[in-house]
Image (cartoon, rainbow, N blue to C red):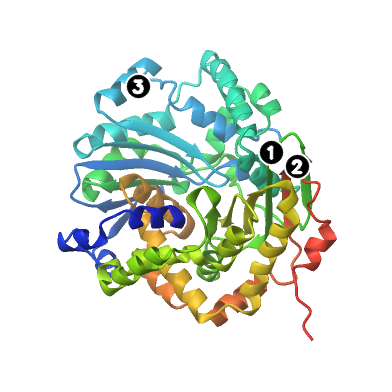
Amino acid sequence: DYLFTLRVYLRTPLLLSLRRGQASVSYAQSLLGAPETRLTTLSNGLRIASEETNQATCTVGLWIGCGSRYESEKNNGAGFFLEHMAFKGTKKHPQSALEQAVESMGAHLSAYTSREHTAYYMKTLAKDLPKAVELLAEVVQSSSLSEADIEQQRSVVLRELEEVQGSLQDVCLDLLHATAFQGTPLGHSVLGPSANARTLTRNDLVEYINSHYKAPRMVLATAGGVNHDELVGLAKQHFSGVSFEYEGDAVPVLSPCRFTGSEIRMRDDALPLAHIAIAVEGAGVASPDIVPLMVANSIIGSYDITFGGGKVSLLGLLCCYIMIIYSVFKMTIISLIHLSSRLARLAAELNLCHSFQAFHSSYSDTGLLGIYFVTDKHKIEDMMHWAQNAWMNLCTTVTESDVARAKNALKASLVGQLNGTTPVCDDIGRHILNYGRRIPLAEWDARIEAVTPKIVRDVCSKYIYDKCPAVSAVGPIEQVPDYNRMRSAMYWLRF
């Protein structure tokens, strides 16, 4: 992403843009200008959260605290199947009428399912908010779930499962979860196995809804041209009837998902490239270690060979220098220089891989902190060596300049990710479920700014140093090192 951004900016007439005053808002001003997120809770426990701006459009959605982690081996994939069923009609609106209602508003209705969250949301004109909330309430509470629609969607889900098998990144990361959290619900894939897609019944779907679609686990979130008080009134009208009780007080409690250092390999020499992921157990979403680990991942960065080399050209450095003079561009440019991370430079200079990215998948009580890369079969050992070397550097030799560059890149990234009402709405919904409140950008900024090289070294040593990793590999992977070799590279012997 940073490489692409640099290429775009190097093609932009920077000084002309400055003279025209196009970049008139600094990073600090964007933090101070962020609107407040208001939060209200109904008597049944459903929470309503909104960020109000003066836009003509808005995004409104329902975020629910359930996903594949709440499923068993028998019903794994039920949440994903329900996502497909959501727009096949309600008791009040058949599918054609539902589609017509959405299209007549010029709106976009969508949904997604993850390991711990499910979301149904709509992007629409702000004036159509009442109708959007009404339709969302119907979709979540009154889906028809007819036997005919279930059978029709069964073939659609099976086809989608086949398509996902063609995405080797998805396959590799699903295998990583399967081995890292083996024997636990976090080892399940979100889509579930094809065997379940063939056998899930209407009763399975209804039972899933009755078990998990409870008001205290729901957040009605909005962003854009909305009025919070109006939204609360709409929520009372359409969601007051959502149950907050469980049959027999059977409140589902998440069991701890233990991490297991292990490996899983799926060798296929017919594939052109090897897809490999290595990870250790990361921090849960509410852990204070989250921010230092975010900075650590930012130090490692990402790389893609299609975006050019890992070095910044002389022209690029000159442009960067000119832009740094202007404080309004300061955050953007420091984030662009982030592409010169040690691992990115090595990847370009030594032709180690086609791409890599550092990642941290955080869940309520655990996570996966890792590096995923795609490489030629003859470069696997070299790339694995330098990836683990980058981890060791985080634990032992990370410098002030490394941290400063990474912090600024991370700040710019956080701001860039919230461009538009839909990503803001998603951020609100997930934050309320994870933290019970929306963490404002200014607070993230302060927490990032407080990170020091010593904190990075200490936190990374806690999670990475001398830990057993989980490894997944797909493709022509004969050269993947023996697990004991990869385990021994998780520490350095110093004399």
Q: Secondary structure at mark 1?
A: loop
Q: Which residue is mark 1?
A: 272
For label 2, the crowd category at 10 Å Cα-Cα, with few meaning under 14, some 14 to 19 and many 20 or more, is: many
Q: Is residue 100 above or below residue 392?
A: above
Q: Which residue is mark 2?
A: 476
For label 3, the crowd category at 10 Å Cα-Cα, with few meaning under 14, some 14 to 19 and many 20 or more, is: some
Question: Is tag 2's residue or tag 1's residue first in the polypeptide sequence?
Answer: 1
Q: Which mark is residue 495?
A: none
Are the residues flagged by discs 2 and 1 in contact, CB closer than 8 Å?
A: yes
Hey, what amino acid is under mark 1?
Answer: Pro
Residue furthest out toward the bottom? 495
- Residue 213 percent coordinates (x, y): 49, 39
What whole-number distance in Å separates the C-alpha atoms at marks 1 and 3?
Answer: 44 Å
The part of the image, by quadrant, that contains residue 2 is bottom left
User: Relative to 382, is 341 on the left or the right?
Assistant: left
Question: Is tag 1's residue or tag 3's residue first in the polypeptide sequence?
Answer: 3
The total number of labels drawn is: 3
Q: Which residue is mark 3?
A: 98
Closer to us: 403 or 222: 403
Residue for point 19% across, 42% down? 56
What whole-number distance in Å separates the C-alpha atoms at marks 3 and 2?
Answer: 47 Å
The part of the image, by quadrant, that contains residue 155 is top right
Mark 1 vs mark 3, foreground winner is: 1
